[in-house]
Amino acid sequence: MHRFWSQLLLLLLLCLPGLEAAASPALGGQTELRTRDSTANRILNMALTDAFWQSATKNAYTGRLYDEIRLRSYGGGYVSLVTGEGEQDYQHKVVADIVFRQQNEIPQHIEGAKDVVFLGEGIDPVNGAPYTDTFFYLDMTFFYATYTQRMYRLETDDGRTILYFEQLDESFVDAGTWSRYQSMIRASSEAVERRWVGNSVIPVTEIFGMFIVSPGASRDVRVTFINKLAFGEGTGMLAQVGSKMPPVIRAGLQSGFNACVAIARTEQNRRGQ
C-alpha cells in the first residue's frame, strides 16, 4: 500500500504544469527510418519533424535529469517525448552503447522492471541496420506487462545516433531462432515472483519508439526518447485506460529516463571515462 500511495503522489506531481522552456530535442526530419510495421514506420518518421509536435502539450523542468516532456495525442493514444542532458557530461558512444546493448541492466535501477532479457543480435535483412532483440517483463502495479522488441542502430551524418525499435514477432527471425527466443522468454517469465493479487500478465498490444543521442547544448550529450505504447481490445479496461492517461505516461517516461542515466553513469565510471 505504501508503494501505491508513493506512486500516486508522484503521478500528481507530474500532472502539475511545467514552465515553458528552451529544451531542444535534436529531431532532424531529413533522416529516414525503416521498420517492418507500417504504422510504426509512418509515426516514427513523422516524430522526427518539428511539425509533428506543434499540437503537443509541453511541460518543462529544471533541476532534473530531463528538461522537457511532450505528449502528442494521436491514434486514440499518445506519442510521448522526454529529452534531457543528464546534468553531467557523458560520452556519446557510452550512451549509445548502453541503449543498444545494456537495457538488460534496467531492473537494477527500476523496481517495476522485473526482468529484461537480451535475446540476440545481428544485421536486419530488411533495412540493413544492426539490431538487438530484447524481452521485457514489467510490473505495472495492478498487472504485469510483457513485450519483445527489435532495436535498430543508425548513425547519421550530422553526428546523431538513432536507436529505434518496434515490436518483434516470429516473422523477424527463422524458426530455430524464434524457438530459442521463446525458451528464454519462458524461463524469464517462470522465474519472476508475482503478487497473488493483481498478478495477471498482459502482453502489450502496440509499442514502438526511438532514442536519439545527439550533441548537447550545455553538456556533451542530449538524449531524446520518443515512444508509443498501447493495450488493445481484450487486454482489460485498466490496461487500456492506463496507457492513455498522461500522468501514467509521464511517470513511465521519468522512470525510464532516470534509469538510463543511472546505467550510463555506472558504465562510464567502469570504463574510466
Image (cartoon, grey):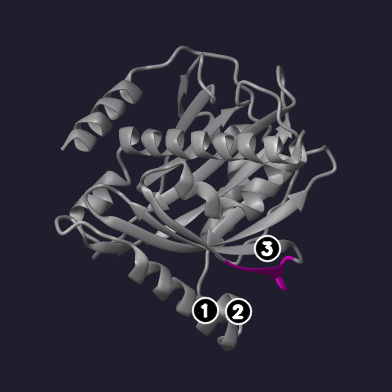
> Do the CB atoms of the residues marked 2 and 3 lie less than 8 Å apart?
no
Q: Residues within 10 Å of mark 2 (few under 14, many from 20)?
A: some
Measuring from the top left, give residue 69's x and y in whole percent: 48, 28
What's under tag 1, amino acid-wise?
Glu
Measuring from the top left, give residue 3's x and y in whole percent: 23, 36
User: Mark 3 highlights which residue?
Assistant: 131
Q: Is residue 9 magenta?
A: no
Rendered position, 105 above or below 86: below
- Residue depicted at 46% across the width and 12% down the height: 19
Q: CA distance from mark 2 to mark 3?
A: 12 Å
> Do the CB atoms of the residues marked 1 and 2 lie less than 8 Å apart?
yes
Residue occupying the far bottom of the picture: 175
Question: What range is drawn magenta here?
Answer: 119-127
Is residue 148 rendered to the left or right of residue 239? right
Tell me the quarter of the picture where residue 124 sits: bottom right
User: Mark 1 highlights which residue?
Assistant: 170
